[in-house]
Amino acid sequence: MAFPTETVYGLGAHAGDAAAVRRLFRAKDRPADNPLIVHLAEAGLLASVAGTVTPLARGLAERWWPGPLTLVLAAGAGLPAVTTGGLGTVAVRVPDHRVALALLRAAAVPVAAPSANRSGRPSPTTARHVLAEMGRGVDVVVDGGPCPVGVESTVVDARGDVPVVLREGAVTREQLGVAEVAPAAADREASPGTRYRHYAPACRVEVAAAGEGAVHAGGLRDAGLTVGLAGSGPAPGGVRELGRFSDAAGLARILYGVLRDGEETGVDVIVVEAVEEAGIGRAVMDRLRRAATSPGA
Ligand code: TXA
Ligand code: MG
């Protein structure tokens, strides 16, 4: 069953039911070494899926849940290896969305829920995106309207004394008080799902400098390509306007929809203007760069 969260739509299954979780992996065509986030109705249930709840995790849960922060902790005994990727750890969050929370309370079990897209593709932020993406791969889609945030949760290793960011997301480093890390260390720390080309539509994606989207798109148009643009200003003549935003949070809300719309309308290239890499802009630029990576890279 697909359902909305504050970040993106998830595809949920009973986290303790290995057969159900295997169906999720099949529906997404997801590599088995990329584990899932377990969703809970409330922080009080954390001890039911985590082996050790550190003081750091307790503090972060209290501050951020319900919310777009995922905590990685030592896994409890109850979860099958297929859910945790056999890593001995579990990723957990309590989503901040009325529909998701109602569903989790009704299910009364921990729910493993990856984003409801096929592996490597843009995450869905509307029910229509889920249907377009998954087709018959999903039994039920609960339509809760567009997701208010638009990019995924921040994944943090909370086993130690300080949070280590494994995936940039909606809760920012600034909010967590965690500094940027050197690229080499970031690679070592990255969560399994950040290894692959990701978030990518079928067509080419190019990143233009802030404020230069129209000029960049115009150049590609002049070279004979059909072009779509998402930027801070209007699209020039002969370029399809895919979206407009005034800040990083604005781009976060529309980014995945822009990638899908560009793909559906059949443009050769989607041009997206860069935003500053601060706050939620880090997560947005991380997704945008991965979407723009050439296939096979
Ligand atoms: O906002 C979100 O987090 C959305 C909504 C539906 O909750 N879910 C989501 O799930 O983005 P997914 O499966 O698309 O991404 C989960 C990420 C992957 O990068 C995965 O590698 C990482 O979390 N992850 C899961 N379990 C982990 C673990 N035990 N250790 C490290 N990383 C883990
Ligand atoms: Mg995903």
Image (tube, rainbow, N blue to C red):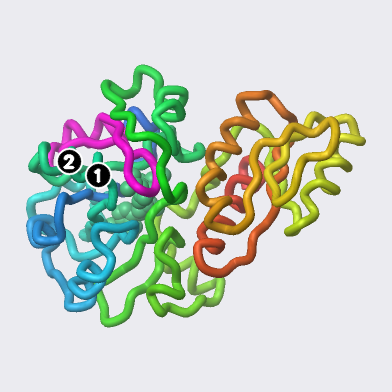
* Mark 2 residue element: helix
Segment tinted magenta in the rendering: 1-25
Eyeballing the image, is 65 above or below 11?
A: below
* Mark 1 residue element: helix
Q: Does residue 228 belong to the magenta stretch? A: no
Q: Nearer the viewer, residue 236 or 53?
A: 236
Q: Is there any visible trace of residue 82 in the rendered image?
A: no
Q: Looking at the rendering, which quadrant does residue 87 occupy?
A: bottom left
Q: Position of residue 55 (x, y in %)?
A: 17, 78
The quadrant of the image that shows the N terminus is top left
Q: Position of residue 246 (x, y in %)?
A: 63, 55
The answer as to whether callout 1 falls within 8 Å of ligand 1 is no
Ligand 2 is found in the corner quadrant, namely top left
Alpha carbon distance from label 1 to label 2 = 6 Å
Q: Looking at the rendering, which quadrant does residue 154 occupy?
A: bottom left
User: Left or right: where does residue 14 sit relative to residue 170?
Assistant: left
Q: Disc 1 marks which residue?
A: 98
Q: Disc 2 marks which residue?
A: 102
Residue at 23%, 60% in the rendered image:
89
Eyeballing the image, is 263 above or below 44?
A: above
Give the residue type at disc 2.
Ala
Residue at 45%, 72% in the rendered image:
173
Residue at 43%, 50% in the rendered image:
149
Q: Position of residue 140 (x, y in %)?
A: 27, 23
Give the residue type at disc 1.
Arg
Q: What is the crowding at mark 2: few (fewer than 14 residues within 10 Å), some, or many (at least 20)?
A: few
Tag 1 and tag 2, C-beta contact below 8 Å: yes
Q: Looking at the rendering, which quadrant does residue 146 occupy?
A: top left
Residue at 39%, 29% in the rendered image:
127
User: Left or right: where does residue 243 sit relative to residue 284?
Assistant: right
Residue occupying the far bottom of the picture: 161
